[in-house]
Image (cartoon, helix red, strand yellow):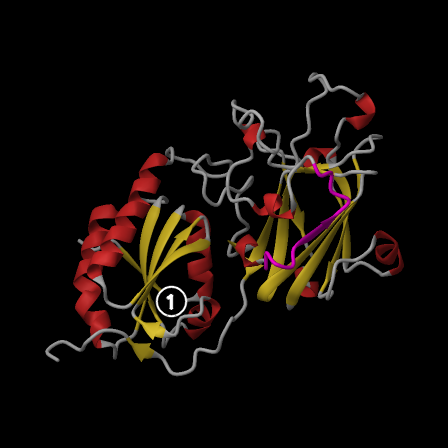
Amino acid sequence: MSELVQITSREQFSSLLSSSTFVVADFYADWCGPCKAIAPAYEQLASQLSRPNKITFTKINVDNNQDIARQYGITAMPTFVLFERGRPTSTVRGANPKELNDLVRKLAAEAQKAPEGDDAGSSSGVGWIGAPAPKNYSDISDQYDPKGLELLNRASEFGTAKTLFDSSKPSSLNNAKGKAGATPDWVESDTDEQLMLFIPFQSTLKVHSLQITSLPPSAEEEVEDEDERPMRPRTVSLYTNRSHVLGFDEADDIPAVQTVTIQPEDWDPKTGTAKVDLRFVKFQSVTSLVIFFVDGDGDSEKLRVDRVRIFGEAGEKREMGKLEKIGDEPGE
């Protein structure tokens, strides 16, 4: 018996990406011969490996769901896209049963490692997020352009801007606390408590919300200098579609698109993560984002951020154009 889910709308697919840890999507067309040829193999994989809320197999007719196909840059039939925690991680282009089988079984093995009921705070190591993804939206953090990423006022002995987008679970949530001698997998401010993060994107996004993770030492943990005990962010100002990182003085002279205040009760006690809801209407066509951590929740001169996650919808990287089929028609 097939375990395939037929996708009929963008909302249905977004909801499924939020509710199932792993999703396999078959982008196909009724007129595509190679799609029909590989369909039995795909159905067999779905029947064998589907697990409720863990790994879900879907079929997406590109003619009926062109908005979804555009979102993920689908230009050829069939294309299989594998998602983990709402983020596309692998693609198989064409009717290649062996490649599809190998990739899906590898994914199933990863699903097997993840504990049952593991949602926010998963230790699976790929696509970690500190709180559930907002309904109907995906983690689009991987859409940033690493070449243009900048972080001002970063203390050099800690991580870099890329550390904030590391897909792994923060080491401070593990008993090991990271490897001895390794560079800490978080960032801290340098001369004062402010940090300025510039994030250029690979395509135009709709940004719905943010998740900010901060795991400073607890009040019971000893630090060398109490004045140097890092704080969690409190005031955060956001700017969109800037061509470069803002200077701190420049940010003071430019109205922010939105400024939020993170309250102490907003921080999840288990994951150290706060959800930041945005005025979605103001973040509909975002090509870059500046996150200005203005101050912290105490009197220290240091601010700490472990992870940043961005949720919303990824834009188009290319026009669909004329869809092509990959593989030979049966009997050719």
**Magenta-colored span:** 145-156
Is 309 left, or right, of 95 in this rendering? right
Residue at screen point 49% across, 75% down: 318
Is 173 left, or right, of 212 in this rendering? left
x then y, percent, for residue 209: 63, 53
| Residue 220 found in image quarter | top right
Q: Nearer the viewer, residue 62 or 73?
A: 73
The C terminus lies in quadrant: bottom left
**Membership of 152 in magenta stretch:** yes
**Membership of 268 in magenta stretch:** no
Q: What amino acid is found at the position of numbered circle 1 in the picture? A: Thr
x then y, percent, for residue 171: 55, 31
x then y, percent, for residue 204: 60, 68
x then y, percent, for residue 39: 20, 65
When the figure is inspected, residue 157 is found, relative to residue 282, above or below; the finding is above
Is 289 left, or right, of 298 in this rendering? left
Q: Give the residue pinned by disc 1.
A: 8
When the figure is inspected, residue 326 is found, relative to residue 47, above or below; the finding is below
Residue at screen point 54% across, 62% down: 313
Find the residue positioned furthest to the bottom: 322
| Residue 269 found in image quarter | top right
Residue at screen point 55% across, 41% down: 131
In terms of secondary structure, where does tag 1 sit? loop
Q: Please say whether residue 50 is visible from this viewpoint.
A: no
